[in-house]
Image: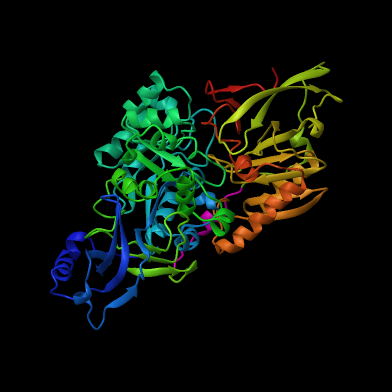
Amino acid sequence: MNTLKTWPEAAPRLIAVAAGRAPADLVIRGGKWVNVQSREILDGYDIAVAEGRFAAIAPDLSALIGPETQVIEAKGRYMIPGLVDGHMHIESGMLTPAEFAAAVIPHGTTTMFTDPHEIANVLGLAGVKMMHDEALMQPVNIFTQMPSCAPSAPGLETTGFEITPEDVAEAMAWPGIIGLGEMMNFPGVVNADPKMLAEIAAVQNAGKTVGGHYASPDLGAPFRAYVAGGPADDHEGTCEADAIARVRQGMRAMLRLGSAWYDVKTQITAVTEKGLDPRNFILCTDDCHSGTLVNEGHMNRVYAHAVACGCDPLVALQMCTVNTATHFGLERELGSIAPGRRADLILTSDLTTLPIEQVIARGKTVAIDGKLVAECPHYDWPQTARQTVNLGKALVAEDFAIHAPEGANTVTARVIGVVENQAPTKALTAEMAVTEGRIEPDTGRDLAQIALVERHRGTGGVVNGFVSGFGYTGRMAMGSTVAHDSHHMIVVGTDRDMMAAVANRLGEMGGGITVWKDGVEIAAVPLPIAGLMSDDPAAEVAARASRMVEAMADCGCTLNNAYMQHSLLALVVIPEIRISDLGLVDVTRFELTDLFE
């Protein structure tokens, strides 16, 4: 475990250094101090660090340089706090916490607030503890939110494990737990479901923060009821009105820019044009896959995007540092360059594009010019975490056959409509012909088949339906055991034989992603840990993921970040229509619905 003295433990030394009675461990000289507490830039300042914390910031701290003191010359560059991601799921990067940290540290991220509800659905509380324990081993700050909703919508899906109020209460005593993960079961909160309220109560009684997730456009009575239930933030807003409604009701509005979600530009106008107080706005990713991390960045990407959208750089910086720390009750611990805080700092020569030139975490240099120079230790993942794909039998083409009602020549089928760059789907319908009692995919009308294959308990269950928006052509199929949130197996294809082959291949791999075309596998991303993550280096996983994206394009797909859309097709808490192991789900009414009208 990567230990850091608490402020009270470090206080005698911090005071001695600040008073000039003892030398510092590190002095950064001659930089521009970007002060997110006062929102100003102060030129010609030095920063002294002791015990992994900031001890003093002043125009000349050369007197604190002793024979053992490390000195870094800022050379007039900006000295900004390390970046903070307010909401994310490490598993969505297809990486373990160690490899995720290794990928984002060079981009300047020194703190993450993570909700491991993906692994909770597969391995329950034990899986959350594994994520929590590896997180605490890292040289940067990874705080864990105890997952709240497994299943995310009780009665509409079946998870590998369920999270209970007792689990939540137990986790509140773990050292790295900061609060409750996003409360996705918003109908449960609105209807005062005793289980959901018991989870919230356990967290509030522990004095910790309850994460929100209100994925409905209704900002009337249901929204007010949800806020009254206790969730303190929300990242599901997609327009200015959403952001305004949340902050007016006392929530923090989390604006996200991930690999597939582009919700900053449409909401940040609440600050840049409407002039709302920016202190209740937070930037986050929710989520980035490995390719985005390796090739584009992490929170530095979100920050630069917010600035490009017209946000004042200092305001944008507050939104990904001190605002986030304050929200989680950690303003005195991190998020700013001020005495006593963890010495997490970035040196950069430009506040608009934010090149990350040197990253310091807890007073140690962890990255220089995009290169990691720190160790990110690995947890010893047990076999129980590596053997989680249980199909129960070898699947065949007939498992993917969609039979028409008796005597029908045509049917009106419900179709899941993918919306590019957004989490919601559209509930579409299509008139489809019946051939020999079956309904086949229709690539000419962009109607592919989707199947949800049960993979936790080995039931052999397959639920079939239709999806539109990917643009697939020819004979193809792709499948993934990353299938938010219950993480069964999603297979999308135009050919039943290949859909069966894809499912069996994923079982053989122990989880991951595979793409097939004309009967041959053309890309694969093995994810052996819980069928969600790899403990290989991010660059290797990103290269496989990049080939996977190319393979989807080879099959006719033109969507931006289509894989993220694929992996969310079973997310039964976001409208309008999804698929689960129990059937098609109408998320506007939170009930199961028939494939045919």
Magenta residues (range): 376-389
Numbered marks: total: 0
Which residue is rendered at x = 72% and y = 47% of the image? 552
Is residue 436 highlighted in magenta?
no
Quick check: 13 left or right of 501? left
Q: Please tell me which residue lies in front, 535 or 300.
A: 300
Q: Where is residue 410 in the image (x, y as percent from the top left)?
A: 81, 18
Quick check: 118 left or right of 348? right
Q: Please tell me which residue lies in front, 382 or 486.
A: 486
Q: Quadrant of residue 533?
A: bottom right
Q: Which colour scheme is used?
A: rainbow
The quadrant in which the C terminus is found is top right
Please indicate, yes or no, whether residue 503 appears anywhere in the rendered image: yes
Q: In this view, does 147 lie above or below 414?
A: below
Please indicate, yes or no, whether residue 193 appears anywhere in the rendered image: no
The quadrant in which the N terminus is found is bottom left
Q: In this view, does 294 lie above or below 17?
A: above
Q: Is residue 278 above or below residue 85?
A: above
Q: In this view, does 379 lie above or below 530?
A: below
Q: Please tell me which residue lies in front, 353 or 563.
A: 353
Quick check: 313 left or right of 585? left
Q: Position of residue 262 (x, y in %)?
A: 53, 41
Q: Position of residue 487 (x, y in %)?
A: 56, 42
Q: Main secondary structure of the magenta part?
A: loop
Q: In which quarter of the image is residue 368?
A: bottom left
